[in-house]
Structure formats: C-alpha cells, structure tokens
Amino acid sequence: MLPWKNEEEFIKAAEKVEFGKEIIEAPPIEEYLIDSFCVEVEWKDDVEVELAAITGTVHPDYQGRTWLWLLKYGKRMKINLNLLMHNPRYYFLSEKKIPSMSYLQIGKKYYVYSDGNHRTCIAKFLFFFYKENLFFQG
C-alpha cells in the first residue's frame, strides 16, 4: 500500500525532492552514431540497474528537462501514475516487466534507450522515498 491516495499526492511529495531538479541528460553521442562507436553490445534479461546511475535518455522530448518535469508532464505519465496507484507491486517485485525496459551504458552512466522513460522516472522517485525512510510517512 502506498502512502499517497492518488497521483496528485505523489507528485506533491515529489516536488520536495531535490534530485527532481536534475536535468535529464542526453547521451554524449548522437543516437544515430551510437552503433558506429559501440564497443560492445550485450542484451541481458533480469538485470538490476542502479537508479541513481540513470542520468538521461536518448528520447529527445525529455532531454534537457528535469525528472520532476517528466513526472508531471511526460506523454504517458498520467497512465503510468494511475497504474502505480493501482498496482504498486509492479515497482517492488523483480519479475520481468512488460514491455521491457532498455538502457544504454556509457562509462558509469545509464540512459533510457528505448522503452522505460516514464517507469524509470517513477522508480527513481519511489526509491528516493524508500531510501530516505519517507515512504510510509506520506
């Protein structure tokens, strides 16, 4: 059970989170050039990615915005927040996620590569609340 009654309460709590002001980075290389400079391609299922290491996305609509902006105005964020309120277990179980999420790693940084921008954003805020022991305080 989440401590927030609805999506608006979750967003209101997220507005107080400092990392929400961080800019969503673009990868340091243009998306169309990534394959040309790629040293290794490795697809793995069931991999944990440290949420703090996810600093950006290849999606041009979200680059240069903040994580809070994405939480408030992302194209499919209303749908994803509604799903969070109705099925929060999705974010806490280690089962395979459909649709899958993919990340591009460059050095120690990760970028959302194809699918998963909205879910990654929500997960980053949820993890912050949990880590700071604010999760069950509302």
Image (spheres, rainbow, N blue to C red):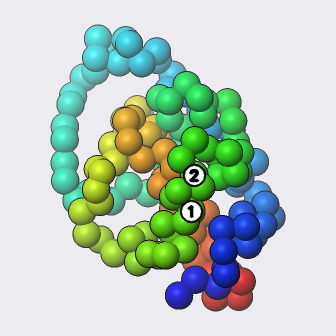
Residue under label 2: 77
**Label 1 – label 2 distance at C-alpha:** 6 Å
Q: Which numbered dot is residue 126?
A: none
Q: Which numbered dot is residue 81?
A: 1
Q: Is 21 left or right of 111, judged from the image as shown?
A: right
Residue appearing at x 45%, y 38% in the figure: 111
Decide if residue 127 is in sight here.
no
For the C terminus, the quadrant is bottom right
Callout 2 crowding tier (Cα within 10 Å): few <14, some 14–19, many ≥20: some
Residue type marked 1: Leu
Residue appearing at x 56%, y 62% in the figure: 81
Check the image and report above or below for 22 versus 2: above
Number of marks: 2
Q: Position of residue 116 (x, y in %)?
A: 42, 47
Q: Looking at this view, is 102 or 84 the one in front?
A: 84
Residue appearing at x 69%, y 36% in the figure: 65
Decide if residue 97 is in sight here.
yes
Q: Position of residue 32 (x, y in %)?
A: 38, 13
Q: Could you tell me if the residues under marks 1 and 2 are in contact, i.e. CB atoms within 8 Å?
A: yes
Picture quadrant where residue 33 is located: top left
Residue type marked 2: Met
Q: Is 11 left or right of 122, judged from the image as shown?
A: right
Mark 2 lies on a secondary structure that is helix
Check the image and report above or below for 62 versus 13: above
Check the image and report above or below for 38 versus 42: above
Picture quadrant where residue 10 is located: bottom right
